Image (cartoon, rainbow, N blue to C red):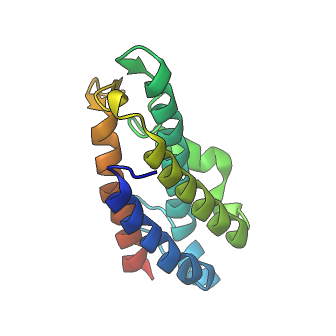
């Protein structure tokens, strides 16, 4: 099935494929000790990327069957993403499992992008900041967010 999001999916699939082995091979010092400007380790950044994929998966699904605008919990704003990272203790997660979870959740969201009903692209979600974000805008922004975090990891390693 051809999707308007095939180019995004191809780009992200390439990044997932190239980063999977790279992440898996990182030494413990690089994944557990070095911290970015938000004071997150590579483990925590990868965990945050898992949270992003799973939360966006749920938003996309809700935007398909609920009336627009959808009010769905916003984990990323108002400091909640740090709570998610802490509660799940990504810092203590077995690295190989976390890498595989990152791969699987991101491959799944690419699959979901290809399933999106074009008639739902204008459906809106209201963020915790009161912004209305269309389904289309959410999908189009996903690569920016994904690459932002890969660049953070690149800087740390």
Residue found at x 61% / y 85%:
25
In front here: 35 or 13?
Answer: 13
How many numbered marks are there?
A: 0
Residue 71 picture location, percent across and down: 42, 19
Judged left or right of residue 110, residue 93 is: right
Residue found at x 64% / y 58%:
90
In front here: 54 or 11?
Answer: 11
Rendered view: 115 above or below 110: above
In front here: 126 or 6?
Answer: 6
Residue 133 picture location, percent across and down: 29, 31
Residue 149 in sight in this render: no
Q: Quadrant of residue 102?
A: bottom right
Rendered view: 8 above or below 132: below
Residue 11 picture location, percent across and down: 37, 67
The C terminus - image quarter: bottom left
Residue 115 picture location, percent across and down: 48, 42
In front here: 58 or 3?
Answer: 3
Residue 93 in sight in this render: yes
Residue found at x 40% / y 20%:
70
* Residue that sits furthest to the front in the current view: 1
Residue found at x 34% / y 34%:
118
Q: Quadrant of residue 44?
A: bottom right
């Amino acid at each position: 099935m051809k999707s308007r999001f095939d180019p995004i999916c191809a780009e992200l699939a390439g990044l997932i494929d190239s980063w999977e082995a790279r992440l898996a091979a990182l030494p413990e010092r690089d994944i557990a000790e070095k911290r970015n400007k938000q004071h997150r380790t590579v483990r925590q950044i990868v965990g945050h990327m898992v949270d992003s994929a799973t939360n966006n998966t749920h938003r996309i699904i809700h935007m398909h069957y609920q009336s627009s605008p959808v009010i769905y919990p916003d984990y990323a704003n108002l400091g909640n993403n740090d709570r998610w990272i802490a509660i799940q203790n990504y810092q203590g997660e077995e690295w190989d499992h976390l890498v595989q979870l990152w791969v699987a959740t991101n491959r799944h969201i690419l699959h979901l992008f290809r399933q999106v009903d074009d008639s739902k692209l204008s459906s809106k979600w209201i963020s915790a900041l009161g912004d209305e974000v269309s389904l289309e805008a959410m999908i189009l922004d996903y690569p920016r967010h994904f690459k932002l975090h890969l660049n953070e990891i690149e800087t740390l390693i």
